[in-house]
Amino acid sequence: MDKHLEHMPVLSRGRHRNPKRGACFMELASYLAGERWSDHPACTHPLLAALARLVNDNVNDENRAALVPLVPSIIGLTGDDLRVDARIALRCATTALPVAAAERQLALAVSVLAAEEMLARLDGAPPGRLSEASRRALDEVPHASEQARRFSRAAKITEKGFRRYAAPNAVQLAVVGIVQACVNDPDALLRRLLEETIADCAAMMHGTTPAHEAMTAHGSTAAPPADGPAGVGAAPEAAVRV
């Protein structure tokens, strides 16, 4: 096993032409899955893969190497259930919202409400359902949360718009928000985000609810539909790969 690992591609930022030049997280996943070399392999849900690429590109070299054990767990997590996109977006937004700078909080709060609305709709639940994780995250930023609710009441969300714009924007905004946050160890938070999102996806695709996530309704706090012209706010300034 050790001899085999000596010949594995080394994780580094960005795309790579072939394994000799290194690999990003998803290129290594394609390698291990026996697919054609690619950072967009078929073995992983596209939005989960986007999060993995963003985390790969935004941690330092030492912490990137520590991501290698997570690669096998992402292989085979794929499908077209929109609940998966919504759960990924929700995990990302609720993780980033409490630590993000003020200028990113509104877009992230809108992302939380949009993901909750989509999950409620897909589950056939009444609008306004909030998970405990969402409630806690929104309570951390009351001003942005109130603005997000006002914005959401005037916006309409569609399944196509959510998958194409809102969910990917939530993932990108969350990663940039964490990278630029005033926290002691943003790399550790990014790794935890990736680990927990992989666990969420594995649980959903295996037909169970993650034990660490309460996704049931709590109280009567409203979470109206949310979706702007481009999903959930403008793309962040940082040039990040999705």
Image (cartoon, grey):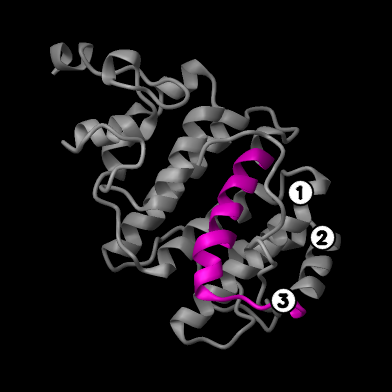
Amino acid beneath label 3: Ala
Residue identifier under label 3: 155
Location of residue 162 in the rendering, given as x and y in whole percent from the top left corner? 55, 67
Q: Earlier in the sequence, mark 3 or mark 1?
A: 1
Quadrant in the picture for residue 189: top right
User: Real-space Cα distance between discs 3 and 2?
Assistant: 16 Å
The magenta stretch spans which residues? 153-177
- Residue 144: image tag: 2
For the residue pair 34 and 74, the one nearer the viewer reads as 34
**Secondary element type, mark 2:** helix
Location of mark 1 (residue): 104
Depth order, front residue of 15/33: 15
- In terms of image quadrants, where is residue 53? top left
Q: Residue at x 66, y 81 (%)?
A: 219
The correct choice, above or below, for 241 with respect to 234 in the image is above
Residue at image coords 34%, 64%? 204
